C-alpha cells in the first residue's frame, strides 16, 4: 500500500491531474489500496452493454464507474479550495490530516 493511498479517505474531494477528465474535481467513493486505485463520483464513467438473463427480459446499457490510479489525483483542501498535499500533525495523542498550504485540518 502506497503512502498516498493511506492519506486518502472516502468522501475526500480530489482533482484530476492528467487524462481526459483533467482539471475536474470529484468525491472519492471507493478506495482499492492493493491496486492503488480509487473510484470517483461522476468521473471516468463508461457504458456496459448487459445481455438479457431471463426470457422476456430486455438487454440494457448500464453506466459503470471505472477506477483511476491515485498518481493522477491530488486532494483538494476544504478551506483554501486548492489542490494540496496532505501532512500529519499529532494533537492530544491523535494523528490528524492537515493541508500543507494553509495548515487547515481535514474534516
Image: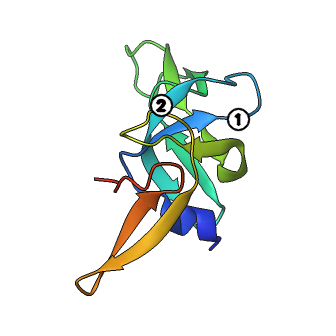
Q: Is residue 3 left or right of residue 52?
A: right
Which one is earlier in the sequence, the residue at label 1 or at label 2? 1
Q: Residue at coordinates 45% horizontally, 33% vertically from top-left? A: 81
Q: Is residue 71 above or below residue 47?
A: below
Q: Nearer the viewer, residue 60 or 103?
A: 103
Q: Is residue 40 left or right of residue 96?
A: right
Q: Is residue 94 left or right of residue 34?
A: left
Spatial distance from mark 1 to mark 2, Cα to Cα? Answer: 12 Å
- The residue that disc 1 covers is 17
Q: Residue at coordinates 47% horizontally, 31% vertically from top-left? A: 26
- The residue that disc 2 covers is 26
- Residue 60 point in image, percent of width and height: 48, 14
Q: Is residue 55 above or below residue 36?
A: above
- Residue 28 point in image, percent of width and height: 45, 43
Q: Is residue 84 above or below residue 91?
A: above
Q: Is residue 101 above or below residue 8?
A: above
The 10 Å Cα crowd at callout 1, few under 14, some 14 to 19, many 20 or more, is some
What scheme was used to colour the molecule? Answer: rainbow
**Where is residue 43, by image quadrant?**
top right
- Residue 58 point in image, percent of width and height: 43, 12
Q: Residue at coordinates 58% horizontally, 23% vertically from top-left? A: 24
Amino acid at each position: 500500500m502506497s503512502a498516498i493511498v493511506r492519506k486518502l479517505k472516502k468522501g475526500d474531494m480530489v482533482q484530476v491531474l492528467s487524462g481526459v477528465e483533467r482539471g475536474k474535481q470529484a468525491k472519492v467513493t471507493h478506495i482499492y489500496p492493493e491496486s492503488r486505485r480509487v473510484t470517483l463520483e461522476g468521473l471516468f464513467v463508461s457504458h456496459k452493454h448487459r445481455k438479457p438473463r431471463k426470457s422476456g427480459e430486455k438487454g440494457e446499457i448500464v453506466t459503470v464507474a471505472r477506477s483511476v490510479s491515485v498518481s493522477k489525483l491530488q486532494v483538494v483542501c476544504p478551506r483554501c479550495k486548492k489542490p494540496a498535499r496532505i501532512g500529519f500533525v499529532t494533537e492530544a495523542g491523535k494523528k490528524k490530516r492537515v493541508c500543507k498550504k494553509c495548515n487547515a485540518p481535514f474534516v
